[in-house]
Structures are given as structure tokens and as C-alpha cells.
Image (cartoon, rainbow, N blue to C red):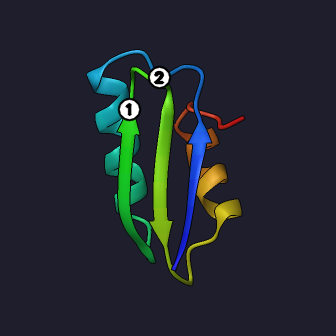
Amino acid sequence: MSKETLTIPNISCGHCVSAIESELAEMEGVTAVKADAATKTVTVHWDAPASIERIRATLTEINYPAQ
């Protein structure tokens, strides 16, 4: 299992957290997602077929690009 914490500068509220967690949780292979508006981060745990590239691409698609 892989894990990474990404910085998402435009997380600003609970809606942002919910949107990010919902979208990433639907990805095949993602096993856990925890977003935090206070720290502007999202921590993702995954196995194949998910990948950090696919996770970053999904975040960009939903207008929460990771830095």
C-alpha cells in the first residue's frame, strides 16, 4: 500500500473536504482519504490500479490541484 500527503492550497471549507474525499474514495484502488481544510492537505492511501499520477489528475479535474 502507498500513502502520500498532498498540499491543496484551495481547500477552504467543509464542502471542499467532502468533494475531495468523495471523488478520491470512488477511485479503484484508493483505500482511505482524509482531507483537512485547516492544514490544506489531503492524505491518500492506495493500492494498484490507483497511482499518485491518477490521484493528482483527478484532483486537477475537480479543481483542487495538488502542489
Note whether 19 is above or below 32 in the view shown. above
Badge 2 density bin: few <14, some 14–19, many ≥20, Cα 10 Å: many
Note whether 50 is above or below 20 in the view shown. below
**Mark 2 is on which residue type?**
Ile
Of 3 and 28, which appears nearest the observer?
A: 3
Q: Quadrant of the C terminus?
A: top right
Locate residue 53: give its quadrant.
bottom right
Badge 1 density bin: few <14, some 14–19, many ≥20, Cα 10 Å: many
Q: What residue is drawn where x is 31% and y is 49%?
A: 22
Q: Where residue 66 appears, x then y in whole percent? A: 65, 38
Which residue corresponds to mark 1?
36
Q: Is residue 25 left or right of residue 66?
A: left
Which residue corresponds to mark 2?
11
Q: Is residue 15 left or right of residue 58?
A: left
Q: What residue is drawn where x is 50% and y is 35%?
A: 41
Locate residue 3: give its quadrant.
bottom right
Q: Secondary structure at mark 1?
A: strand
Note whether 45 is above or below 67 in the view shown. below
Q: What residue is drawn where x is 55% and y is 19%?
A: 10
Q: Secondary structure at mark 2?
A: loop
**Mark 1 is on which residue type?**
Asp
Verify CB contact (< 8 Å) between mark 2 and mark 1.
yes
